[in-house]
Image (cartoon, rainbow, N blue to C red):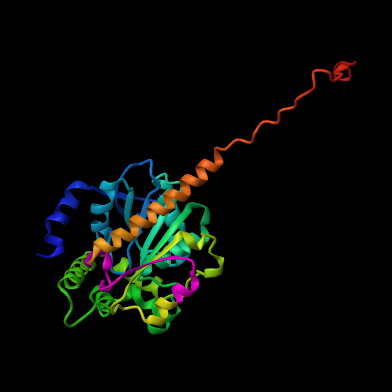
Amino acid sequence: MSLGRSLEFERFRSWVALRKVSVDPRSSKLWRYFEWGPVAETPLILLHGASGTAETFYRQMMSLCPKGHRIISAQYPHYETHLEWVQAFDRFLNALQLEKVHLFGTTLGGYLALCYAQICPLRTESIVLCNSFIDTQRFAGALPFGGFFSFTPKFLLEGILMQNFPSGAVSTEIADSVDFMVQQLKSVKQSDLASRINLNCTKGPFVPTKLQVPHDNITIIDANDEVSLPEEVKASVYSAFPDAAVGKVKNGGNFPYLSFPEEVNLFLEVHLRRMKIKEDVRTSEGNVQEPLEVVTRSPHEDNSDEYSA
């Protein structure tokens, strides 16, 4: 049975309500999102790649939210530039009244998470990158005519994205994940697809040396088998964040969060627990009061000067 018709996905859609919010009164653009978990917790925001939707991460929400984690899977509308996206995402967090967040992003979503963290470091507690990249220059060279994507028919945009999907003999788990992503891709509007490809293929603002989020607050999750990202692109992520934690999925393909969610969910849970411990340490250190200075006097000490006029 396909993932889209599975009992797990049906339960997700019946248990977790799809929400929509406008972040700009001057625009009709809507952010779609699912939210589940205790509101007192700092949420983990899940950001999809160029092919994804808010439904993409249902297997993470179904596993982690019942364990006490707060997760928000967000689907962003079309934006022309990375800076526009960052500004809109910040307004999205404002609309949800979120002071601080953890960010998880896959492929393009990971790059956008890095752009946001660079520009808004005080709001970013930590980052998890899954099959992601730190530079769009390589993709810009592969598809140099980004300005024409907005005029490209939807089926051609879908073809551009699906050419990166695996073909040939693959495991059942990977085949199911690809089928699910194709279904999700078909549901995305032409304007959104054009925007995502444009963001993926336009030189972006992220510079690793400008990122103020501590590198030990970063986790990198990668699949060891063949994925659409070249090895040199993956290596550049490790080089940029040498102190990041690393989680390896042995045979995850392009979408390990769907094909082998147990492994990805374990890495996410470890990351969130690690961040929780660091938060608790900061809180306890902030609650420590300076000892009061106690002045003692000898009973034979002359105190007359203290009370003299």
Q: Is residue 75 above or below residue 279?
A: below
**Residue at 47% from the left image edge and 71% from the top image edge:** 204
Q: Is residue 242 magenta?
A: yes
Q: Nearer the viewer, residue 190 or 273?
A: 273
**Residue at 27% from the left image edge and 63% from the top image edge:** 263
Image quadrant occupied by the C terminus: top right
- List x then y, in percent, for residue 253: 26, 74
Image quadrant occupied by the N terminus: bottom left
**Residue range highlighted in magenta:** 236-259
- List x then y, in percent, for residue 168: 17, 83
Q: Is residue 63 above or below residue 215?
A: above
In the displayed structure image, the side of residue 307 where residue 182 appears, left or right: left
| Residue found at the very far left of the displayed protein | 1
Q: Nearer the viewer, residue 76 or 78?
A: 76
Q: Is residue 85 above or below residue 69?
A: below
**Residue at 23% from the left image edge and 75% from the top image edge:** 155
Q: Nearer the viewer, residue 23 or 114?
A: 114
Q: Is residue 238 magenta?
A: yes
- List x then y, in percent, for residue 289: 60, 35
- List x then y, in percent, for residue 47: 35, 61
**Can residue 31 be seen in this snapshot?**
no
**Can residue 206 be seen in this snapshot?**
yes
Q: Is residue 150 above or below residue 145?
A: above
**Residue at 18% from the left image edge and 78% from the top image edge:** 170
Number of disc labels = 0
Q: Nearer the viewer, residue 245 or 39?
A: 245
